[in-house]
Amino acid sequence: MIAIGERARRAVCGRLFAASYEWLLRGSERAGMADRRRDLLTRARGATVEIGAGTGLNMSFYPDAVTELVLTEPSPYMERRLRARAAQREPSARVVEAAGEDLPFPDASFDTVVATLVLCTVVDPAKTLSEIARILRPDGQLLFLEHVRSSDPRLAAQQDRWHQLWLLFGHGCHCNRDTERAIATGHFTIERITCGQMPKAPRIVRPLIAGVARPRLGAGTGRSAHSGAECLPT
Ligand SMILES: C[S@@+](CC[C@H](N)C(=O)[O-])C[C@H]1O[C@@H](n2cnc3c(N)ncnc32)[C@H](O)[C@@H]1O
């Protein structure tokens, strides 16, 4: 009985989140997030897969250098919207229902993986990043645009304080994740990173990073190294 209640609650929340997602983000997108997406995606090339593509806000920004586009999304409510948008794209994009922790693709099969506002939400960031590294070719690239834990201890403390409530509001979004460190741990070298702010967003989800990471050859779990890449102000 409790399990059914929890499943029903999740379904209602999933539907509501998918239905309101673009409305919730519209201020930030208009005030600069859409430009950040476009800037990042100019670097996409070759066979490209996006993780947790949501409703497909990145879709119109992929350049012609992308030869194949695959969009993954685990939520059926988001996926429905994503499919509708993908069907209108020319050339078309393939939508695959999958979580970042378990990507149904062969090793070394993509040139570019895109993660925007999603490493905050995946259940297991380390597993997701290891899957991304697995499916990337050795000369491939991870393009990321993520809101992250603040480097200001006072704001980080606020993020910790609001974390549980934000998890509910953001449908599983963690406002206090150190995603730069997660990317640089074990599987990737961060080649380029810029820091900024998500415009018109609540303070706890404003700190933003964007950049390019390359798979580190021979890297495995258990190794821990911070990129040391300089975070340039934007
Ligand atoms: C904040 S939305 C971001 C959507 C899109 N990437 C964007 O930039 O607008 C987070 C997305 O991550 C998806 N998600 C949740 N858990 C996930 C997981 N384990 N693996 C991949 N995506 C996940 C959600 O369904 C949702 O579409």
Image (cartoon, rainbow, N blue to C red):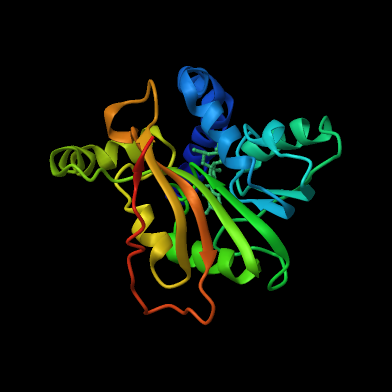
Q: Can residue 16 be seen in this view?
A: no
Of residues 80 and 56, the one drawn nearer to the viewer in this rendering: 56
Q: Which of 120 and 63 is in front in this view?
A: 63
Q: In this view, does 230 lie above or below 63?
A: below
- Residue at the bottom extreme of this rendering: 218
Residue shown at 77% from the left, 46% from the top: 65
Using the image, determine if residue 15 lies above or below residue 123.
above
Residue occupying image coordinates x 65% and y 56%: 112
Residue displayed at 38% across by 20% down? 200
Find residue 56 and report its horizontal and vertical position in percent: 66, 35
Taking 232 as reference, is 12 left or right?
right
Residue lying at 55% horizontally and 27% vertically, measured from the top left: 34
Q: In the shown orientation, is residue 15 left or right of residue 59?
A: left
Image coordinates for residue 210, horizontal then vertical, percent = 46, 44
Q: Could you say where residue 123 lies in the image, as x and y percent from the top left?
A: 45, 56
Residue closest to the eye, 153 or 234 = 234
